[in-house]
Amino acid sequence: MISILLAALAAAHPGPARTADPVVGTWMNPKGTVAVRTARCGGGLCGRVVWASTAAQEAAQAGGTERLVGTDLFHDVRPVGPGAWAGEVFVPDLGTTADGNLMLLGPDTLEIDGCRLGGLLCRKQVWHKIAALPRGR
């Protein structure tokens, strides 16, 4: 009976929205225009767009990505060290995939970089974990 009561109390007051795996969650880009939900997929990491502003959706369409929300941004991303992953990162506004690295800088901060043409063209962003998706677009 006590265990049922404790379970009910835990469900009613779940505490902070953090998981045991700090890379898993919902992340917002620096401009606040795209949110990606990450999850473990097999031995790697997946990331799918779950929210995007109108401007981000239009930029993605201009780059050849017809539907931004629902698009997978991380492909074959595998751990390469503590808090570090490497694989392919899709860049929707360019309509292309780049070699990418993800580095967990803290429990709520994720650095994502991607390079094309053998490292000649690179882009780096710092994303922040969010508890809820923005309202509206």
Image: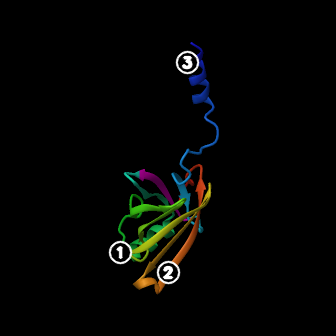
Towards the viewer: 49 or 85: 85
Which is the main secondary structure of the residues drawn in magenta?
Answer: strand
Mark 2 lies on residue = 122
Q: In the displayed orientation, state which residue is furthest to the front.
A: 81
| Image mark for residue 64 | 1
Labels 3 & 1 near each other (Cβ < 8 A): no
Q: Amino acid at mark 2?
A: Cys
**Residue 95 placed where, x, y %?**
38, 75
Q: CA distance from mark 3 to mark 2?
A: 53 Å
Towards the viewer: 119 or 4: 119
Residue 72 seen by the camera: no
Q: Is residue 8 above or below residue 92?
A: above
Secondary structure state at the residue bearing disc 1? loop
Instruction: Find out whether residue 38 is within the magenta segment.
Output: yes
Q: Amino acid at mark 1?
A: Gly
Q: Give the label, 1 or 2, closer to the camera.
A: 2
* Residue 87 placement, left or right of 133: left
* Residue 22 placement, left or right of 38: right
Q: Amino acid at mark 3?
A: Ile
Q: Earlier in the sequence, mark 3 or mark 2?
A: 3
The part of the chain drawn in magenta is 33-40
